[in-house]
Image (cartoon, grey):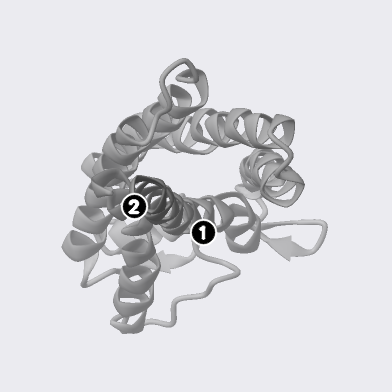
Amino acid sequence: MAGAFLLFSSFQWFLVQAAVAAGWRTPYSLSRNFISDLGALHCARFPSGTGPYVCSPGHSVMNVSIILWGVSWAVGALLTAERGHLTGNVLLAVGGLGTVLVGVWPEDTNLTVHALGALIHTVVGGAGMAVIGLRRLRRGHALSGVLSILVFVAAVVGIAATGMAADSGSLLHVGLGVWERIGIWPQAAWLTVAGVGTAWAAVVRRETAAAKAA
C-alpha cells in the first residue's frame, strides 16, 4: 500500500502548481509560460531577452514539490513492481529520477541538466507507462492499457512540439505551454490513478483471501 500511496501523491504537484502560479505578481499564462517557469530562481525574461518575463516568488515551494514528486514516483514505481515484470516499473522509476533533476536544477541555473531531466521524465517515464499498458492489454484490461499507451504518445508529441515551439512561442497556433502540458499533465494524472488502482487491487485481494480462509 505504501507504493500505491506514493504514486497517488503525484496529485500534490497539480495543487502546488496552482498555488505558486497564483502568487505571481505578473500574470502567469498556461499558454505562454513553461511549467518550469514556476521554479525559476531569478526574475528575468526566459529563455532569452525576448521571452516572457519570469518571476516566481514561490519557486522554492515549486522545486521542493517537483523533487518530492520525483522521489515518490521512483520509489512508488519500484514498490509496486510485479515479480517477473520489472521492465515497465524500472523505466517508470527512471522517469521519476529525471523529475528529481528538474527540481534540483531549475531552468535558469543549469538548463542543460534541467532539459535532460525533463526528457528522461517524459520519454523514459512515458515508455514505462506504455510497457505497463501493453501488459494490461495482454491481461484483457483494454481501457487502461490503451490509455497508458496514449499517455506515452502524448508525452512524445508534447515534448517534441514544445521544443519546436521554444523559439517562436507557439506551434500550429498553439502556445508552447499548452504543448508542454499535453506531454506532462497526463503522466501526473496516470500516476495518481495508478496509485488508486493499485490500492484498490490490494484491498480486493485481501478481501478475497479472507473470504477463502473463512
Amino acid type of the residue tagged 2 in the rendering: Ala
Above or below residue 5? Residue 104 is: above
Q: Mark 2 points at which residue?
A: 214
Above or below residue 85? Residue 156 is: below
Q: Nearer the viewer, residue 206 or 52?
A: 206
Give the percent coordinates (x, y) of residue 151: 65, 46
Q: In this view, does 69 lie to the left or right of 117?
A: left
Q: Nearer the viewer, residue 172 or 156?
A: 156
Give the percent coordinates (x, y) of residue 187: 53, 50
**Residue visible at 29% across and 44% down in the picture:** 3
> Is disc 1 surrounded by few (<14), some (14 to 19) or many (20+) residues within 10 Å?
some
Q: Nearer the viewer, mark 1 or mark 2?
A: 2
Counting residues from the start of the chain, the first of labels 1 and 2 encountered is: 1
> Is disc 2 surrounded by few (<14), some (14 to 19) or many (20+) residues within 10 Å?
few
**Disc ID at residue 189:** 1
**Disc ID at residue 121:** none
**Residue visible at 58% across and 33% down in the picture:** 132
Q: How far apart are marks 1 and 2 (CA)?
A: 38 Å
Q: In this view, does 172 lie to the left or right of 65?
A: right
On the question of residue 41 being in view, the answer is no
On the question of residue 53 being in view, the answer is yes
The quadrant where residue 186 appears: bottom right
Element type where label 1 sits in the image = helix
Residue sitting farthest toward the right: 172
Q: Is residue 3 left or right of residue 30?
A: left
